[in-house]
Image: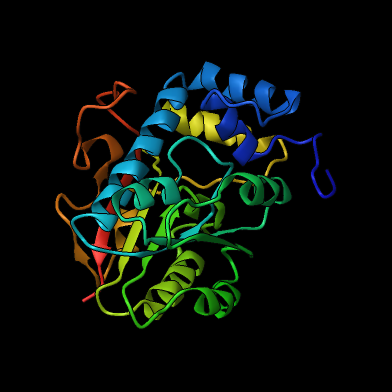
Amino acid sequence: MAGIDTSIPHSARIWNFWMGGKDNYAVDREAGAHFASIYPSIADMARSSRYFIMRVVRFLAGEAGVRQFLDIGTGLPSHDNTHEVAQRVAPDSRIVYVDNDPLVLAHAHALLTGKGTGGTDYIDADLTDPASILDVARTKLDFGRPVALMLMGVLGHVPVSGDDDARAREIVETLKDALPSGGFLALYDGTNTDPSFVEAVGDYNAGGSEPYVLRSPEQLGRFLDGFEPVDPGLVEIGRWRPDPNPFGDAERHDAWGGVARKP
């Protein structure tokens, strides 16, 4: 497929491997297995993060009454994607996915087809250019009504310079500013809370793939500044409104997430 480099491991395809999917190559499986040899909990974290997203979307489409979702950093389609969960709760939910990876976009157009009346749509754009994302998103969503902005596992791809997280903060603030009152920001990302996870990510970054940055929970929490946190706030993903699930959530997760509402 044009534009896809199968000689270098790719985060979306490695994640697909950890989730037990088939949309990956030998180089991704090798990198994913090496990562797991250093940090064996990664497959559990991948499954738990998927179920975290499902719980978040159920809350947003159900209790919060949101009908519009802007999901940036879609990744490869899996089971219970955002539109599937939202449209089961509210068939009139509209979901716009954003990614700039050619493999992700090819699969998205083929598989992320909503059955609800709200529909799905796609934007080929990069998180690091939020203005371009918003320019197109405003033609696909009504920003006069609440929109849920989803940043699930993607902020790690925005570099940090020492303790200066200014670039990521600027990106997130631009997106937050565009949300109307009553909109939501939902996010999660890997955290630097376990030395073996830090080591595994360091090895991954040294292999030539697009680097991934682990932030502290405190750094992630700052992205929610100015919004009203939804109980229980920013926590380990398995502790966010847990319920019985098929993945048997591990007790500890080196990924934190939360949801907050724009006043």
Check the image and name the residue furthest to the bottom: 144
Residue under the point 21% across and 61% down: 64
Give the mark count: 0
The answer to which image quadrant residue 183 occupies is bottom left
Check the image and name the residue furthest to the left: 231
Q: Position of residue 38 (x, y in %)?
A: 51, 20
Residue under the point 32% across and 78% down: 145
The answer to which image quadrant residue 4 occupies is top right
Q: In this view, does 153 lie to the left or right of 207?
A: left
Q: Position of residue 196 (x, y in %)?
A: 45, 26
Answer above or below: position of 26 versus 52. Answer: above
Q: In this view, does 141 lie to the left or right of 101?
A: left
Residue under the point 26% across and 34% down: 238
Along the line of sight, which residue is nearer the eye, 222 or 145? 145
Q: Split into 4 quadrants, where in the image is the N terminus? A: top right
Along the line of sight, which residue is nearer the eye, 253 or 71? 71
Answer above or below: position of 40 versus 253. Answer: above
Q: Position of residue 186 (x, y in %)?
A: 34, 57
Q: Where is residue 81 in the image (x, y as percent from the top left)?
A: 46, 44
Along the line of sight, which residue is nearer the eye, 165 or 65? 65
Q: Split into 4 quadrants, where in the image is the C terminus? A: bottom left
